[in-house]
Image: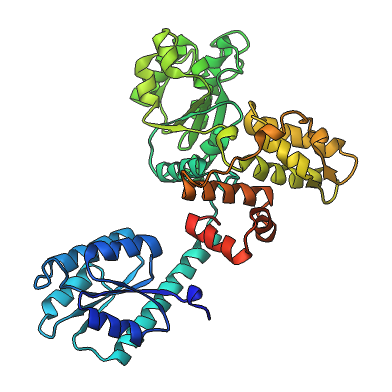
Amino acid sequence: MSAAKLPHLLIVEDDRALQKQIRWAFDQYETLGAEDREGAMQLMRRYQPPVVTMDLGLPPDPDSVSEGFKLLEEILSLAPETKVIVLTGQNDRANALRAIALGAYDFFAKPFEVEMLGLTIQRAFRLHELQKENERLQAMQQPDAMSGMITRDPDLLRVCRTIERVGVTDATVLLLGESGTGKELLARGLHESSPRRRERFVAINCAAIPDNLLESELFGYEKGAFTGAGKTTPGKIETANNGTLMLDEIGDLPHNLQAKLLRFLQERVIERIGGRNEIPVNVRIVCATHQNLQSLISEGRFREDLYYRLAEIVVNIPPLRARTGDASLLAHAFVRRFAAENGRGAMSLREDALRAIEAHAWPGNVRELENCIKRAVIMADGNQITAADIGLLGGVEAGETVLDLRNARDEAEKRVTIAALARADGNVVKAAELLGVSRPTLYDMMHRFGLK
């Protein structure tokens, strides 16, 4: 096995001779050496070793244990799954027990037996490996609330993680983004990641319903409340009781209904049209809009007090043109989906089609891309989709990626790696060929950038 494949073992010891002896004794691992807290944390952040051995007495005050305990807390704060083995003096049992209480895996008194320490290190590596495998299996068994979101873009991935974190709360969420960016998909992900997931998710588009009907759609009505009201009908808010209600295009909500919605958000009760009874409703509100609500407030078209009720958590969704590699990634997924739905067999995107997709600005975002690919799958003559099939022949060259590794090497490498994986539809061999690197090198880059 090459050194590059060996697991990392970090040894924190200010006695250089002893550090050298430990590294020599455990050469079956890729050993890393540090003499102080700062050096140890630099190696932790760079390599994230599964196992660490450390002395408590470290510079600048090796006769005190304060620096060692600070390092222990910093290591476990950065990487809680790391197994830390503390090396102590013979009469240092109290500090050893304190280290265990803080989260250390084990402790050894100096001078230690190499064989015994070796067995403990081996068990620590094995336990770390089993815990990682257990996490992976649990993740496979539990449905991901964001499973419908296809992306490798770091900004959108952060949005997804925000949705998952906020989902467990009852906070009112405001989703801001252009039309076609996936606001309803994120709202459904919010519902699926919440304790309300077994209840109903109800969505209503405030811009799609005439103003004179929207109130009854939201709040419901009693029998005989108006001509045609033949029976008592609950509204969307009441229907979503104990679940989640999404108010899409909230910026188009009429001014008179804004006041009524504000009262509901404050009191959590509704009155049906024509009714006199207050009906308590327990519902989680998620709102979405492509409009600038702050501008609407300044124009007097949206209530400021309602905005602050709705904007407990504000999530900005990036447009497709700002999401690195996502256009190609989504295009591949849409081709597979629509080819299966239309009985076209195995279809793929030709290189000129991929260049055209990457060059286009997609003002209609994912919805526009989806419609283009659906049309192309239906109309293409063969099993390869061209730029002409998609209807994007202009401006292909303008979209070529400019690689500038001098100014921001890591960021540029990450973006290019994401783009290559997207263009190759996740095929590591093909992506490595596009990048001009070996497959192991690409795997290393994916690991370094946290790409799956």
**Residue at image point 53% right, 81% down:** 1
The image quadrant of residue 262 is top left
* Residue 58 x/y as whole percent: 17, 70
- Quadrant location, the C terminus: bottom right
* Residue 232 x/y as whole percent: 55, 21
* Residue 406 x/y as whole percent: 49, 46
Q: Is residue 349 left or right of residue 288?
A: right
Asked whether 151 or 166 is in front, the reply is 151
Callout count: 0
**Residue at image point 43% right, 7% down:** 299
Figure check: 379 above or below 78: above
**Residue at image point 39% right, 14% down:** 303
The image quadrant of residue 95 is bottom left
Asked whether 425 or 235 is in front, the reply is 425
Asked whether 11 or 98 is in front, the reply is 11
Q: Is residue 132 left or right of residue 213?
A: left
Extreme-right residue of the structure: 381
* Residue 422 x/y as whole percent: 64, 48
Q: Is residue 268 left or right of residue 354?
A: left
Figure check: 49 above or below 367: below
